[in-house]
């Protein structure tokens, strides 16, 4: 199903209906996506999902099936149904490039259009960004904790089946090397990996027979899962069957630090000095960090990355920050409980740098989205054009968009001060300053 | 996209490839889905996603696009590509009816077929069941904590956009009254709700103008969001504009117990004694329980239900428990670290009752899926046929399947002992006994 336009909270449509009635539906408006805080008291966040969101915008249309569903459900008026039939987003969207880092209050996405056409995108924008960023927020910490050793995402079975594909994509953007998910490979060009599960060994009459079948099919460079029965015997059998050129073994149980150390010694004693060790059992960023001194060559992470490692939604919100009145004047708006002085109005942002190290997330009011020269000179302007007059910038789409996001992420992480990489809870790595 | 067959971990296919090589791929096999424990030390779990899984099975085909992706990625051998082109699941699946409760070790799904055709469904089965059940596991506690007051699911923006639809469905099965998600309404027949957000009030020149527009469009029975500026003034304005027949107000900020009490007093003093109060800010089962004594009429829950309220994946696994050898003999199998005596082999289950109260989850070995008469007499057999010889039982599909699951859930919850409804961490409400 591609009923994207129905991936929407009902109140978005009832609001438009009522605003059409009061003559306010087409007031020029500005919505902003931002996060009030970083989930889990982490040091930085990672914007992920932007490319997927833009693909959703492109297909956000009310076709016959969607209109019939709304008509049958008596959700909206006949007048609104007519308007929806022609709906396509015709405004402008700019925002942080996918893969970019964010901090509390960063204006991650700025959506300009009539109230009606911009409010319509609220639910799908937040669904995409909140989930994908939650995964990237966890993945970036795991990537860093692994200190250059490759990390593979293999959590598909612990996430909704479509979310799993998005998770593989977000983790890859945040530095993971590969995914187990074939659809993520097919849709987004992400490298896929994986060889065998315990069931494969149990299917065969012996572990040796299973290993032989795998090597016959996938070659001696494959990775054998050696812990179905006894790990030491499994490793001996693996080397007997494959020879010392065996590509790798995978360990999926036990105290991994201890098991990996023993496995390395045994492999070396058997002459399999080049055989790599992958570990995979319930890893998260803390477990990975705890294995830094162990002879592990690669990590596989499942549940913790696809569920955001304790923070399964990024907490981003989509708020009206400015709209015109009937007199054509722009009015900055915010709910009473917000700090209106800093939060209302349209904003731009600069990552202010000193000696190429990030020192401040600088957020400025802007009527036109332009970055003042003085601010720009002190760092990097963070917003890029995503949609202009309804036309989506294709740079951010598809597999090319994913690669661009992965590069953006790596470059932005490199700018962070060293403290940003502490895993413990704490303050954001740099302060957000509203100037 | 409907590339369901690629919602699969790569190793499922490489295992089949290697098993075809060793001549074991078509050994008759039995896989079982179960959970080793209840997440969050809860008292019971809720099976959700079964109907969605069956719809995935129906569309699990390798079409030209999927085969091309595998060919281009050099994932599998040409021989396997040929086999995949004709793949459709032709085996049997039985399992717990959707909405049924589960406990540690409950044989939730039993998949029988050749190793190749059954292992293929592992990833998608777990993706669907682990996410949907995680949501239902949280939702059932919220439903119960609300003690008959309606709870609406409005967390779409805090979940992947497709996951959001599944979450709405799972929450409804676990007793929620409605969802904000229009696609969930359209796809699954779930009642949808929602009226307006703060942006609607901010769009207008005054709160009164916004309320008037909403009432003109949605009628006086609508629910007005009264906390954009000052709650007391908001309520006064709401009653001034709507009159005392106003359907409801929504409170989305502040200390809800206090705010709800004040709002009720004010509404009553204004004569709006029938106006209902809905509360919606960051609720979970504990917050709902804390509002039991407050004059709240309805709850709206977002983040916590769609993220499983601290347990975002249900932890179910899909394990080979038996397979035939070349001699035609069945062999019960399990990884070494499992308790092989209790876990290997094909199983059936009975909810053993005394005076209509559940006292034990009885799990028995069975070669044929039949429930012994003696066990059946002591309670309810828990497995139902889902797929027979590849033919899916249509009772479990679509909106009718959702309604059946909702009824099953309610009836099964009614059988639980009273202790099952304590929110605190603890032991499962009934023990699982392998007999």
Image (cartoon, coloured by chain):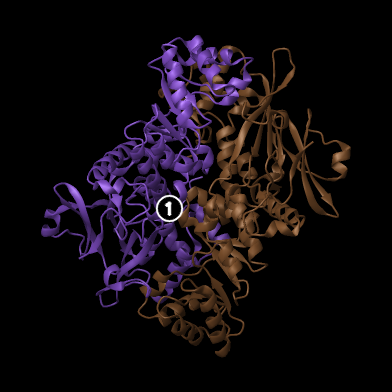
Chain colours: A purple, B brown
Q: Secondary structure at mark 1?
A: loop
Residue receiving disc 1: A61
**Quarter in which the C terminus of chain A is drawn:** bottom left
Locate residue A225 relative to residue B325 in the image: left or right: left
Say left or right for B421 vs A232.
Answer: right
Could you tell me residue B56's position as x and y percent? 59, 38
Mark 1 Cα within 10 Å, few/some/many (few <14, many 20+)? many
| Image quarter of residue B213 | bottom left
Whether A225 is drawn above or below B222: the answer is above
Q: Is residue A15 above or below residue A388?
A: below
Q: Where residue A165 appears, x then y in whole percent?
A: 45, 39
State the image quarter where residue A112 is shown.
Answer: bottom left
The residue under the point 44% across, 25% down is A261
From the viewer's perspective, is residue B107 above or below residue A193? below
Residue A398 shows in the view: no
Q: Residue at x 58, y 43 (%)?
A: B130
Any part of residue A317 in sight: yes
Q: Position of residue A404 (x, y in %)?
A: 28, 39
Taking the spot 65% from the left edge, 55% from the top edge, the residue there is: B174
Which residue is nearer to you in this view: A14 or A185?
A: A185
Viewer-nearest residue: B346 or B175: B346
Q: Quadrant of residue A187?
A: top left
In percent of width and height, residue A26 lies at: 34, 68
Count up the numbered dots: 1
């Amino acid at each position: 199903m591609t009923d994207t336009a129905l991936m929407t909270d009902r109140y978005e449509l009832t609001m438009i209906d009522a605003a059409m009635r009061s003559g306010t539906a087409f007031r020029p408006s500005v919505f902003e996506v931002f996060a009030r805080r970083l989930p889990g008291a982490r040091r930085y966040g990672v914007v992920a999902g932007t490319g997927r969101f833009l693909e959703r915008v492109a297909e956000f249309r009310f076709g016959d099936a969607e209109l019939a569903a709304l008509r049958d459900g008596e959700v909206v008026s006949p007048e609104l149904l007519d308007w929806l039939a022609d709906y396509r987003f015709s405004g402008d969207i700019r925002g942080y490039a996918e893969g970019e880092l964010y901090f509390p209050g960063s204006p991650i996405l700025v959506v300009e259009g009539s109230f009606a056409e911009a409010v319509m995108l609220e639910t799908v924008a937040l669904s995409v960004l909140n989930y994908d960023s939650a995964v990237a927020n966890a993945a970036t910490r795991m990537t860093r904790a692994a200190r250059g050793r490759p990390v593979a995402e293999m959590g598909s079975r612990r996430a909704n089946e479509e979310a799993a594909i998005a998770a593989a994509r977000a983790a890859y953007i945040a530095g993971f090397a590969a995914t187990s998910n074939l659809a993520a490979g097919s849709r987004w060009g992400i490298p896929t990996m994986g060889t065998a599960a315990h069931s494969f060994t149990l299917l065969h009459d012996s572990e040796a027979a299973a290993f032989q079948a795998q090597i016959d099919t996938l070659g001696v460079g494959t990775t054998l899962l050696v812990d179905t029965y006894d790990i030491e015997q499994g490793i001996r059998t693996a080397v007997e069957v494959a020879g010392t050129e065996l590509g790798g073994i995978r360990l999926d149980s036990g105290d991994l630090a201890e098991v990996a150390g023993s496995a390395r010694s045994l492999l070396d004693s058997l002459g399999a000095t080049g055989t790599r060790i992958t570990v995979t059992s319930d890893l998260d960023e803390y477990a990975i960090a705890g294995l830094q001194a162990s002879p592990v060559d690669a990590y596989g992470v499942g549940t913790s990355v696809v569920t955001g490692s304790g923070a399964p939604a990024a907490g981003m919100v989509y708020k009206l920050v400015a709209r015109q009145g009937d007199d054509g004047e722009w009015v900055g708006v915010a709910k009473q409980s917000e700090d209106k002085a800093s939060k209302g109005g349209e904003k731009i942002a600069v990552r202010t740098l000193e000696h190429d190290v990030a020192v401040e997330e600088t957020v400025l009011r802007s009527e036109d989205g332009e970055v003042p020269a003085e601010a720009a000179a002190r760092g990097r302007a963070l917003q890029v054009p995503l949609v202009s007059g309804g036309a989506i910038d294709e740079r951010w789409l598809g597999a090319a968009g994913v690669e661009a996001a992965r590069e953006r992420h790596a470059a932005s992480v490199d700018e962070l001060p060293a403290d940003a990489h502490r895993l413990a809870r704490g303050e954001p790595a740099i302060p957000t300053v509203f100037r």
